[in-house]
Image: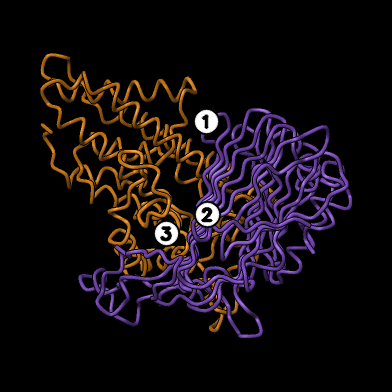
Chain colours: A orange, B purple
């Protein structure tokens, strides 16, 4: 893609915690986990109280990453692959528009039918549409129509169409699909996009832990650099080749590389988020 | 009680077809082959039938492959039950008559077996207009080192209903098994008028990642690395997890009760987890409902479901409902 900043620069932009993506109001079930008394389980509380809360926080991040990498990442990956394929149609990208949109909507719909959790769906939709808005309002080139190449114009139109469909409730606009689209349009490689997707999930869990005061701000940075780093790498390397089945064969149900939930306890606790007597997060 | 074992059908397959003939459910097909066994007791309630889905010896071993096709005819109410939990024994590489192999593409390390005999159960169900399926088996219990795959697909007509319970326990408590099986993979997919409305996929996998690949480049030294989480760590303190799906007009009564019960819950901060937890979420714009539950004791989970689904007595009959959750 003909951009005047390189991939690293875009990565830095996307990793900015001040981006209006709504992730600061999502705890992805962590608040509920704490309220339900899971931070002090015997397996994590062989040390003092503070150590137990830190160990419990890391345990949550491990389990949450494990299931998110297996259930959501393949959708981000396939959306990225679909838009990459569209970009490869350099000659006549307009022909590919409808076919690409169709694939993205199928991905979005499958993610919705696989996410049996109205709290997670709510958060995912809010963050998904925020990403599309971020692109159209923040990342799309401000310049006049003349100095833009055909492909980047076409990609901007693609995202615009998608955003309108989400606004018109023709599709859900879930975060994984939108993430894959955004990162591919911005010219980020699939592997980088996958890595950043899981990194941001882990970092937003740590931010919510700081807000909930289960760990301190320095401890959060320390965990992010030392404990969480290998976890994110592990999950990326294990799940990077997963597919949803939408782009290829769908009806191969015994497939080892299709999305799945790996943490049913996390699902129960995340769904019960709204039942908390008092809460500060939206999920 | 009628039971059929057809010699001509392929190994481990079964076929159930039922239709309504003047308020009596008649099986035009009720056939199965070893190790699958189908039994249908006499039922007094009009329009209701029960089939017990069982296996010879009461368990499945590595490599067993069972395939069941179910067709619920117009206005029939079919209860599919089991007698005791489905026990899945240890996987062993072997070539039984009903063996299927799975190639594990994600742990290609020479040390681990790349060819494993998995126990698989698949069910393909069609539910006709105004009919209903009540799939209320006992839970699946996977023994140490067992590997189990279950794929269930349901095709509903617009006015059809389904109550589907899928649950798994941590193993044999008297053998000190606590989520010690190798792998449990369960897919439940529901289509209504051809449109996919729910795809529930649960993977409980005990094999650790090949950690060599990820960690070498990291700044972290072995002491700051968090130990890998086992399946048991992830699922503690519970030893039973359940998923209940309800869809269609004949489930409205129990769904209304469940929603009312769910709304009364208000959670205050706790020091330790409760012994039993459940959650409720609407699916397909509220046309369906998914309940998940977890319990320290399987018995508590069973009793809870028996109680909250008691409204089904009015749908399938008191005596018939009593045969579930024994």
In this rendering, is residue B98 above or below B192?
below
Image coords of residue A122 (percent x, y): 54, 38
The alpha-carbon separation of the residues under discs 3 and 1 comes to 33 Å
The local crowd at label 1, few if under 14, some if 14 to 19, many if 20 or more residues have their Cα within 10 Å, is: few
- Quadrant of the image for the C terminus of chain B? bottom right
Query: Which label number is shown at residue A4?
Result: none
Whether residue A58 is visible: no
Instruction: Point out the tag, 2 or 1, that comes first from the N-terminus.
Output: 2
Residue matched to label 1? B194
Image coords of residue A41 (percent x, y): 60, 74
Which marked residue is nearer to the observer: mark 2 or mark 1? 2
Q: State the SS at label 2.
A: loop
Quarter of the image for residue B63 reads: bottom left
For disc 2, the chain is: B
Taking the image as shown, residue B212 lies to the left or right of residue B173, namely left
The local crowd at label 2, few if under 14, some if 14 to 19, many if 20 or more residues have their Cα within 10 Å, is: some
Taking the image as shown, residue A182 lies to the left or right of residue B66, namely left
Quarter of the image for residue B268 reads: bottom right
Rendered residue at 10%/31% (across/down): A2
In this rendering, is residue A199 above or below B78?
below
A7, B180: nearer the viewer? B180
B124, B18: nearer the viewer? B18
Residue matched to label 2? B9
């Amino acid at each position: 893609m003909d951009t005047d900043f390189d991939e690293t620069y875009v990565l830095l932009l996307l990793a900015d915690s001040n981006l209006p993506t709504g992730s600061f109001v999502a705890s992805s079930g962590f608040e509920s986990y704490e309220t339900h008394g899971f931070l002090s389980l015997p397996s994590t509380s062989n040390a003092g109280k503070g150590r137990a809360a830190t160990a419990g926080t890391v345990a949550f991040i491990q389990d949450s990453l494990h299931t998110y990498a297996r259930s959501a990442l393949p959708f981000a990956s396939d959306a990225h692959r679909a838009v990459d394929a569209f970009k490869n149609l350099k000659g006549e990208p307009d022909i590919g528009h409808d076919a690409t949109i169709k694939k993205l909507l199928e991905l979005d719909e499958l993610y919705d039918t696989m996410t049996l959790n109205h709290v997670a769906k709510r958060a995912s939709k809010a963050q998904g549409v925020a990403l599309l808005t971020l692109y159209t309002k923040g990342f799309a080139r401000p310049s006049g129509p003349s100095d833009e190449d055909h492909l980047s114009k076409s990609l901007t139109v693609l995202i615009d169409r998608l955003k309108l469909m989400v606004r018109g409730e023709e599709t859900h606009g879930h975060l994984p699909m939108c993430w894959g689209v955004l990162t591919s349009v911005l010219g980020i490689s699939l592997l980088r996009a996958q890595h950043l997707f899981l990194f941001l999930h882990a970092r937003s869990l740590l931010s919510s832990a700081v807000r909930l005061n289960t760990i301190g701000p320095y401890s959060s940075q320390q965990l992010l650099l030392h404990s969480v780093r290998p976890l994110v790498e592990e999950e990326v390397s294990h799940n990077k080749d997963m597919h949803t089945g939408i782009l290829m064969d769908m009806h191969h149900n015994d497939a080892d590389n299709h999305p799945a939930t790996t943490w049913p306890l996390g699902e129960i606790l995340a769904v019960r988020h709204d039942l908390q007597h008092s809460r500060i997060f939206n999920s | 009680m009628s039971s059929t074992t057809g010699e001509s059908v392929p190994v481990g397959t079964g076929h159930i077809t039922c239709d309504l003939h003047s308020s009596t459910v008649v099986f035009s097909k009720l056939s199965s082959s070893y190790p699958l066994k189908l039994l249908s007791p006499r039922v007094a309630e009009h329009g209701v039938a029960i089939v017990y889905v069982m296996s010879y010896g009461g368990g499945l071993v590595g490599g067993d492959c069972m395939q069941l096709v179910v067709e619920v005819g117009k206005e029939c109410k079919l209860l599919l039950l089991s007698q005791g939990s489905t026990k899945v024994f240890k996987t062993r590489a072997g070539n039984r008559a009903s063996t299927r192999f799975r190639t594990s593409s994600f742990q290609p390390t020479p040390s681990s077996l790349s060819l494993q005999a998995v126990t698989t159960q698949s069910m393909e169900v069609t539910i006709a207009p105004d009919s209903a399926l009540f799939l209320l088996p006992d839970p699946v219990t996977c023994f140490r080192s067992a590997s189990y795959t279950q794929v269930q697909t349901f095709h509903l007509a617009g006015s059809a209903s389904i109550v589907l319970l899928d649950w798994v326990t941590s193993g044999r408590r008297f053998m000190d098994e606590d989520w010690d099986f190798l792998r449990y993979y369960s897919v439940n997919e529901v289509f209504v008028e051809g449109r996919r409305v729910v795809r529930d996929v649960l993977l409980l996998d005990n094999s650790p990642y090949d950690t060599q690949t990820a960690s070498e480049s990291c700044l972290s030294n072995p002491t700051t690395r968090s130990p890998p989480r086992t399946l048991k760590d992830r699922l503690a303190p519970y030893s039973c997890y359940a998923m209940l799906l309800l869809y269609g007009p004949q489930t409205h009564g129990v769904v209304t009760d469940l929603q009312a019960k769910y709304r009364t819950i208000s959670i205050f901060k706790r020091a330790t987890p409760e012994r039993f937890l459940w959650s409720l979420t609407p699916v397909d714009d509220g046309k369906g409902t998914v309940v998940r539950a977890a319990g320290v004791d399987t018995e508590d989970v069973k009793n809870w479901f028996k109680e909250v689904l008691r409204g089904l007595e009015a749908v399938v009959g008191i005596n018939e409902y009593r045969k579930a959750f024994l």
